[in-house]
Image (cartoon, helix red, strand yellow):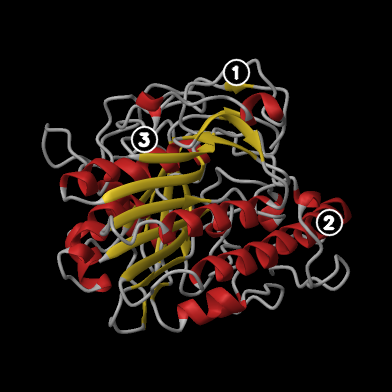
Amino acid sequence: MNVLWIVTTQWRAQACGYAGDPNARTPVLDALAAESVNFTQAVTPHPFGPFARAALLTGIPSPENGVADYYDALPDDSHTIAHDFRERGYTTAFFGKWHLAKRDPRAPLVGEEHARMVIPDTARGGFGFFEGFEGGFQLNNPWLHGSRLPVPTQFEGYQSDVLCRRTADWVAAQARHEPWFCVLSLEPPHPPYAAHPVMPGPSAAELSLRGNVPAENSVLERARAELAGYYGHIAATDRAIGELLACIDISTTAIVFTSVHGDMHGSHGCFRKGWPYEESVRVPLLIRVPQGDAEQRDDPVSLLDLRRATLRLTEGAAAAEAFARANDSRAWAKISMPSVVQLPLQCDRVWRGLRSKQRKFVRGADGAPWLFFDLERDPLERTNLVNDPAYADEIAEWSARFLPTNHTRDTNSFPDFPRNTRKTRNKNHW
């Protein structure tokens, strides 16, 4: 069985037609969801790009995987899912945004300098074929380099269209090299939000905002303006994914769709990511397996476990069973921000939390409880119960779950906060 991961950026779980979002035009993903296991409670382990990507590829959380700061590179000797699949005889490929190489913090985040940066062979996570870019947020006319492009080359068109076509071409050439594992890493619906091609969707005035966006003119105006572009990216990327899937033999290919993190878009008065709220940490996760059953699951799964769960799929496990075995049937998922990324609008503190279907508990860098939400009664997280005496015993129970059960370090323990809280400085504001 072949395996395709489609990984987007900043696509929050709520922003899909199949999830009930009236703003989202996602007919392709809606159709995929109808044939998939839809993990409605999936979360990212870290709601910020490099931390989440490192955890996704290695199955090890940040900072234990070596990425403790925004500009930290994934160590060259990291063992990733690409190594796992190559050891199993698979041909492996990566297309699109990498965001895990060694970068110059003084260079502008937005622009061709990062987009044209060449990622060395040794820093490509063990993938046999590579064609992508480090960053630069060039959502139109992207620059690509890699196995068949020794120097950065610019391609005309919308980034999702270009990458989906290039991925489809590679897949078509694999008929004699099956089985294969491919990661397609798309930047949209990440900003700049004005960079999307014209697609049908609600105008800024027509948008339906989430109920936790405060009624402040400055917040409402910014949220509406950005969301109009955000949903344009979503519609355009959904269309591009559809063109890719039309070129793939889905009878022999497992398809995974997800995102590394979400986006606040004015909820709780916040924007961008890094925050522990649902809009930032909860992500879409669809897994379609050939001849597999479609169902909706409310297990509190994490992308931290996607590496192990995907390998289980190739061993014959059903999607739900693969995740249950990967996360040891835990009743909650771990979420955290390992360091402060000093870019405007992003979360301003280090935090660690636990999230179940019913509850979310978050504490700050000093270990003190910061947030506690009853997600069943308050799914929009409008009431922080952390100081409510009626919940004191329950909060104490959640606090105790942070304590490691032994002195060994492994991916199932939840050690105390790392001491690294250094800030990352850059003049850009994505």
Mark on residue 62? 3
Residue visible at 60% across and 48% down in the picture:
187
Residue visible at 25% across and 64% down in the picture:
323
- The three-letter code of the residue at mark 2 reads Ala
Mark on residue 105? 1
Q: Residues within 10 Å of mark 3 (few under 14, many from 20)?
A: many
346 in relation to 26, above or below: above
Query: Hey, which quadrant is residue 309 in on the image?
Result: bottom left
- The three-letter code of the residue at mark 1 reads Pro
> How much space separates mark 3 and mark 2, taking CA atoms?
33 Å
Percent of width and height locating residue 163:
57, 51
Q: Which residue is mark 2?
A: 225
309 in relation to 137, above or below: below
> Can residue 281 be seen here?
no
Tag 3, which secondary structure? loop
Name the quarter where the C terminus is drawn. Answer: top right
Front label number (3 vs 1): 1
Percent of width and height locating residue 186:
56, 51
Tag 2, which secondary structure? helix
- The three-letter code of the residue at mark 3 reads Ser
**Which sits in the foreground, 191 or 195?**
195
